Amino acid sequence: MKRLLIVSYWYPPLEAIGAVRVASFVRHLPGFGWEPFVVTVNPGRWTPEAGEPDADEDLSRVCRTPGMDIGRVLRLLSGGRLRGGLVTRGGCEKAGAWTLKGLGLWLYDRVLAFPDAAWPWCVLGRRRALDFAGTVAPDAVLSSSPPFSSHVLASFLSASLGVPWMADFRDPWSGNVWLGYKGGTLDAARRFEARILTQAEALCTVSRPLADALRESSGKDVSVVMNGFEPSEFKEPATLFPVLTFLYTGNVFPGKRDPSLLFETLRALLDEGRVKRGDLRFVFYGPNHDTILGLACRHGVEGLVECHAPVARRRALELQKRAHVLLHLEWDDPRAKGFFSGKFYEYLGAGRPILAIGPKGGVIEAALRATRAGRVVAAASEIRSYLLDCVSDSRRGVIPAIAPDVGAVSEFTRERQAGLLAGQLEEMLRRHPEKQRPAA
């Protein structure tokens, strides 16, 4: 069995889609001839909050290095008054480049948190990671981002060991529309990215459009390995909510990915008397209470909208199975058509109808058409028709249902995606026989 060294900042007990993706590779790759070993960060005060640690974790297979998240450090030191991360670029634009706040945010983006806020783990954990890698003696290295500093550490380990390295992009780096790099920061990110990725033997990402863009910018071979879902997580039966429930789990981004059009359409239906307040409800689980409630109040639908704090992933999966319809919000921007959110795969696993609100022609619409698991609506008229059909069925005691293509849905399982990754790793080794580890 070949050995794979995986470098990923995100790994359980940290809870994020990156951790879920890497954990699924660790679980399924042995079935395809690859024995995985992981270099990751040690959860603590200066890193993101984690769930319960695994008391039975095999320390011979997982190396946890010291780490530090710059944004979290700033928040803790300021008593929560300062924030770092994705908000800084938007905040800088609003504040003005030459205001004190603008200069501070520019300093954060260009100096303190470049290439990302997690970069200290590449420095603090380098020696421990190298010692661990030397003991493992891997056949190949795989790094997963974001944070993109994972690639920096993997590049160092690959060069030190003399084995080929594949860089996995769950999201783009310099070309990430969500990060919104501009001007000098964008130029610096592009140069940094190009310098690091010249050392990678192969790249992979989560959708065909993103692979095409990455191939064009890097000149590298790029394969597609989606995140997928775990069927075993959805085996337990669940009772639907008593009221027609549209559920959304995750972040909302004002003006980019928010329910404004949905709430506007719902208000019109209320005014016309086509929908009554007891007919349905919209439930949101995530960190954006103020944003969602503010939009609901603005459109006069606050009585139909419930907001709850983020919950553990296991609880989110239970809620998804109980919903009548799973709500998926997309950013109305052509550059975002290649993005799969992590929740989309969970929605597929839950087996409930998916209502995706956003532009057509992207990977979400293609996947929903292939699987017959839901539909994409882009206009108020389409949302209106969908809501009226659901309310009419509910009044007659009919539950919204789907008849998915089981074979098409199975293509999105994590085991299937791990098999694709294993095949790409084998191909990378075949292209570079000079870097293969001698047989034991």
Image (cartoon, grey):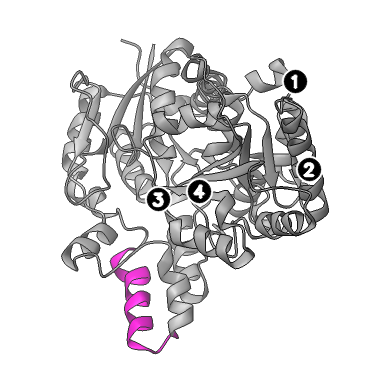
Type of amino acid at the residue the image marks with label 1: Ala
Closer to viewer: mark 1 or mark 2: 2
From mark 1 to mark 3, how far is it between C-alphas? 39 Å
Question: Which image quarter: residue 403?
Answer: top right
From mark 4 to mark 1, how far is it between C-alphas? 29 Å
Which of marks 2 and 1 precedes in the sequence?
Answer: 2
Horizontal placement of 400 versus 234: left or right? Answer: right
Look at 28% across and 23% down and name the residue there. 137
Where residue 295 sits in the image (x, y, percent)?
57, 63
Closer to viewer: mark 4 or mark 1: 4
Horizontal placement of 23 versus 296: left or right? Answer: left
Closer to viewer: mark 3 or mark 2: 2
Q: Which residue is mark 4?
A: 306
Which of marks 4 and 3 precedes in the sequence?
Answer: 3
Where residue 346 sits in the image (x, y, percent)?
54, 31
Q: Are marks 1 and 2 in contact (CB under 8 Å)?
A: no
Work out whether residue 205 can be spotted.
Answer: no
Which of marks 4 and 2 precedes in the sequence?
Answer: 4
Q: Which residue is mark 1?
A: 403
In reply to whether residue 99 is colored magenta, the answer given is: yes
Type of amino acid at the residue the image marks with label 4: Glu
Viewer-nearest residue: 150 or 339: 339
Q: Residue 148: which disc?
A: 3
Type of amino acid at the residue the image marks with label 3: Phe
Which of marks 1 and 4 precedes in the sequence?
Answer: 4
Task: Say which element carries label 3.
Answer: loop
Viewer-nearest residue: 118 or 162: 118
Closer to viewer: mark 3 or mark 4: 4
